Each structure stands twice: as C-alpha cells, then as structure tokens.
Amino acid sequence: MLQTDTEHKKNKRKIAIILSIIPGIGQMYNKQVFKGLVFLVLTISFFVAFRDLFQFGFWGLITLGVDPQYDHSIFLLIEGILTVIITILFLGIYAFNFYDAYKVGKKRDNAEKVNGLREQYHALIDNGFPYLMMSPGFLLMVFVVIFPILFVILLSFTNYNLYHSPPANLVDWVGFQNFVDIFNVPIWRETFISVFAWTIVWTFAATTLQIGLGILLAVIMNQPDIKFKRTIRTIFILPWAVPAFVSLLVFAGMFNESFGTINRDILAFFGLDAIPWMTNAMYTRLALIFIQTWLGFPFIFAMTTGVLQSIPSELYEAADVDGATIIQKFRSITLPLILFSTAPILITQFTGNFNNFNAIYLFNGGGPAVSGQNAGGTDILISWIYSLTMNSAQYGKAAAITMILSLIVIIVALWQFRRTKSFQEEDMM
Amino acid sequence: MDINKQKIIRLTLSYIVIFAMIIMILFPILWIVGSSFNPGNSLSGSTMIPENATLAHYKELFDPQRSDYLLWYWNTLKVCIITMVFSVILVSLAAYSFSRYRFIGRKNGLMTFLILQMIPNFAALIAIYVLASLTGLLDTHLGLILIYTGGSIPMNTYLMKGYLDTLPKELDESARMDGAGHLRIFWQIILPLAKPIIAVVALFTFIAPFTDFILARILLRSEENYTLAVGLYQMIAKQFGNEFTLFAAGAVLIAVPISILFLLLQKYFVTGLTAGGIKG
C-alpha cells in the first residue's frame, strides 16, 4: 500500500509531461486549473487566429506560388517568414508548457506545496518582469530589423528581378545562382571586382587620412605655446557640427564643372585649367577622398584631444631628461597611448566609411558612368546595391551582394570585438 | 640659442598648418553663405561677397505658397522628436532588464543585439521598401519613425546597458529590502542616476534620423512628406544650378541651428561615442 503510494508520487511529473502534449492539461492535473486554462486558451486561439497562415504559409514558402494569376510570390515569401516566426514563438510557449508542468509535478512528487493562484501571480510578475520590459522594443526590432534581414537572406536565393516579378510573373528559388552569376557572368564579375576594389581603396584612403589629420591637428593644438586655442578648436570641430548631408551637397556645388567655385575661382586664380571633377572617375574619386577627410577628421581630433589631455606630463618630462627629440616623444609616448585608447573607435571609422552611402550618393550619385559595367565609377558596394534595387530592379542580385557585404562587416566587427576584449585586459597606463 | 631657433621653427610650422586648415574649413562655409545672399537663381556672375546682397531666397523659403521648405523642417523635427522619445523609452526598458536581471535567453539576446548593431539597418533596403509598400507604410512618417526607432535599439541598448552596469547593485537591493517594486526601483532609483546616458541616447536618436538620407529617400514619395535631407537633395538634383542660391539659403538654415546645438552638446557626443566603441 505504502509502496504504490510512493510509486504513484514519483509518477506525477511524468504524467504531467505526457498530459502536456495538449498544452494546459498537465497544469490542470497539477491542480493549477487557472494556469492550465490560460495555456489551453492561448493554444486554441493561436491555431484559430493563424489557421490560414499555418495551412498556406509553409506551402507558399516552399513553392513561391504555382499560378501567376492567383499567387503573388513576394506576398507568399513574406507570409512564409511570418509563419516561421510565429511557429518559433509558439514552439517557445509549447516548450515552456512542458517545462512548467515538469517543474510543478516534481514539486508534488516531493510533496511540496503547489503555488496557489496568488503565489502564481507573484511568481509571474517576478520572473516575467524582464521579459515584459523588453518585449515592446524586441517586438519592434523583430519586425523592422530582423524581418527585413531574413527577407534579404531568402531573396538572395531567388530570381526576383524585372522579368520575374509579380503580379505578372512568379519568382522562383534558384539556389546559389545569384552568387555564382556575380562571380561567373563577365559583366557582373567585372563590375563586382571594380566596385569592390574601389570600396577597399576608398575605405582605407579616406579613413586613414581622416585619422591621420585628426591626430596631427590634435597634437599640434596640444602644444602649450599655441595661442587662441579655444577659438581654433571650435573652428576645427565645425565640419562635424554641420550635418554631413548639407556639407556634401554644398561640396557637390563647389566641384560642379560649370559654375562650381573650385574650377571657376580657385583653379583660375592659379591659372590652371578646369578639371572635370564630375565626369572623370579618377577626379571624382580624389574629390570624394578629400571631402570625406574634411568631414571625418574633427571627430578624431576631438577624441584625441581628450586623450592627450589625460597623458601625465611626467612621461614627457622624463623623456626630456633623457634628451628625446619631439619626433621620438611622439612616436614612443603620444602615438601608442592614443592608439591604445582609441583603437576600437578607429575601427568603427573604417566600417563606417565602408558603408558610407551618403558621401558617395550625395556627391555625384555614384557616377560618372563607366562603360563595360553596370555600376558608376565611384559606386561602393552599398550604393551599387541601392542603384540595383531602385533603378534596375535587380532585387535578387542586390540581395546577394547585400549578403556578401554583411558578411564582411560582421567578420570585421567580430574581430574588433574580440580585440577590444583583449585590449581591456592589457594594463598599459 | 639652438633651442630658441627650434622653437620658432616648430611654432611657425604649426601655425602654417593651422592657418591652412582654417582656410579649408571656412572656405566652403563662407562660400555657401555668400551664395545664399546672391541675387538671381544661378551662380553665374556671382561673387562670394555679393555686391547687392539680398534676403530674397530666405523670404522665398519662408513663404509656404512658394516652397515646401517649412513643411520639410516641420516633418523632420516631428520624425526626430517622436523617434527620440520612443527610442529612449524602449532602450531604457531593454537596457535595464539586460543590466539587472538574469533570465533565460539573456545571453542570446545580448549576442543578437551585438550582431545586429554591426549591420547598418539600411543594408536591408530592398526588404524595407517591399515591406513598407505591402503594409501601406510607404510615404508615411509612421513607417519612417518605426524603422528609425527599431534600428536605434540594438546599439543604444548596448551603450546604456554598459552604463547601467557601472551603477552599484546595492542600491537596488536595499530598495528591494525596503519593499520597493520592480517598476518603482527602475523609475525612482535607476532612471535618475542614468540621466547622463539618457541624454546621450536622446541626442543620438535625435541626430540619426535628422542626418539620415537613404531611408527617407526610399520611403518618402510625395514632396509634402519629405524630410530636410531628401527635400534639399531634390532641390539640387532637379535642376542643378538653376536654383542653387535657393538651395544655399536652405542649407544655411539647417546648418546654423544644428551646428549651434552640436557645439553646445559636443562633449556628450565624444563621451557617448567613446563609451559605445569601447563597451560595444
């Protein structure tokens, strides 16, 4: 008699789990009727509300439609993603249902008191509080950040373009065809290589120059015997203070070939011929690097100024005693300390320029046009993606290039993150 | 004697560099200000210091009958302020949970935020465009605000969590002893202490939509809905040169207030960006 009783006791968690295959029944078995009802109602309403989605969502995601008259592939794709997200959400709740039934069943097996409605409420508030606080932001992020990313990832495996676009036509899965095309079809390969090469040159040239100039000016302004420091520093910050899109458009006017001041006033003043800034890719590139340096150095300048002011003067005094020259002091005291404390931010400057759509697009729209490729002479990856999407409706290819670009950014950023961690452990000061 | 000579060379070189930089910085600014006072529409025959300066272009911009400029200004401020308010609320809630609670999924959540903040949210511009047109959010400010707010969450949550982590936990615990609830601790203890970082987040989430061009360009279609960045671009792109003086006046009217605001709050930018870079 006693034996069976303990056996029976041990089984409560198992029975609760088995009953939980239908959500809520396990909780009811555990004598938490209200909680069980909540689970049950939640499940039923889930199935009622999303019945159609579950029925057609996966079918649509796999086939992308069969009859262009009725099926809109892009709608089906979006509904498919939605179905996957909702399914994951549901599976989460389902798993929690098992976990909860098991936990309470175990409590009963151990003959502990099961929470009443009141305690359940308090437990929910305590454990659920962080989720409650996060959920508004997280939900918004799922829909405007994660959803688009999933969409782009899937799109890069389709042939979605001008000729395969609903409602007249269907979109189909093509596997890795877009990626293969980018590296195999001559016009795509040539364009990709030249755009990628310029993106790299642009990133390194513009970023290195703006960092170099920023540090140089900060060091110059840190000399104790420079006059009017405050005024000069404010002027040096100005290019950062003016919104970049305004400055870029102003520069586009200044470099304009017919009325811009650069050709008309400055070059004419020195008796030089007008330069085709906007129609010769080489000159446009030079102008862009100059402009980005102008735009970007003040941030480095401001940051480095802060670092320089925190370097203890004893270091320099000790160097003076040893008879170090200015250049030696800069190379072995100033520069290492600046680089040590600003390295992570300097790397974000590189990734920032790598994706600096505004500079490229607002100055000359990525142009001038170049023969033999479908991107402009100063297009970087991100502005090429833009024109593929907005001007030539090459959505599938654009998505594939977006994937390549994101992969590069993520690799660089993860590498930066790991370095940052290791940087923090070093003790230099 | 030799040291003196060295000092003179060093100072001369420094001042030459400083002087050259000042010219390079101020020249574009003076040029655009000068252009905005030039009579006539195009720049042919204009000078940097106009002989018969005119305020006509500014008057035109302020005349709703002749230009949408005031409307654009209003749109931009509306979008920026609403984005800022939403973002600050959502970011503080998320950052507080990540900083103070240990819950299932916390680590994965943080990792997701970390990776998401690395991808610029306009990288998915095709998706944003298609989704917005499907949901009817194309050409609305609501769509723009939602995207800006959602996009600002990962990076700023990380930034704020880093700051909240530095506040001593004993404060919360002693408040809990005294019987304060979760919301009360957040509202009365954490938030007042987090004011500096809230200021930074507010600043960032205001400035980001203000200076954004690409998302506004993709989403906004009709002229009366434009933000300043798109409007100004259209002004210059439509008929480059023919309306350049008007554009110049528009540019000056954006640059002056923003620059003043920026110079006043500059130290927040530096601390915010520095903290973000190191903690991120």
Image: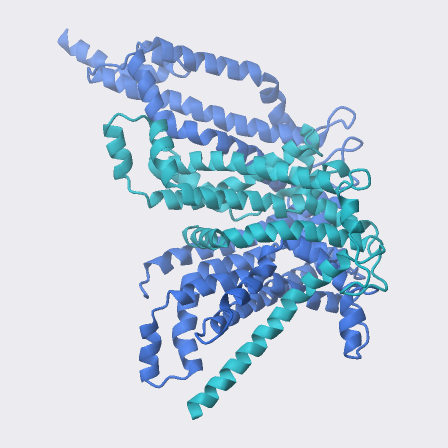
Chain colours: A blue, B cyan
The image quarter containing residue A186 is bottom right
Position above or below: A166 against B49: above
Q: Position of residue B29 (x, y in %)?
A: 68, 61
Q: Answer with left or right where residue B40 lies relative to residue A61.
A: right
Position above or below: B254 against A200: above
Q: Quick one: A223 or A13, which is closer to the camera? A: A223
Q: Residue furthest left?
A: A2
**Quadrant, the N terminus of chain A:** top left
Q: Answer with left or right where residue A145 lies relative to residue B216.
A: left
Q: Answer with left or right where residue B120 lies relative to residue A315.
A: right
Tell me the residue at 47%/37% (across/down). B91
Q: Residue furthest front?
A: B52
Q: Is residue A378 visible?
A: no
Q: Quick one: A283 or B14, which is closer to the camera? A: B14
Q: What is the count of numbered marks?
A: 0
Tell me the residue at 70%/43% (across/down). B217
The image quarter containing residue A55 is top right
Q: Answer with left or right where residue B199 lies relative to residue A245.
A: left
Q: Quick one: A119 or B169, which is closer to the camera? A: B169
**Quadrant, the C terminus of chain A:** bottom left
Q: Position of residue B171 (x, y in %)?
A: 27, 37
Q: Quick one: A224 or A20, which is closer to the camera? A: A224
Q: Position of residue A326 (x, y in %)?
A: 43, 81
Q: Position of residue B266 (x, y in %)?
A: 50, 54
Tell me the residue at 72%/58% (across/down). B33
Q: Residue furthest bottom?
A: B1
Position above or below: A5 against A156: above
Q: Is residue B167 visible?
A: yes
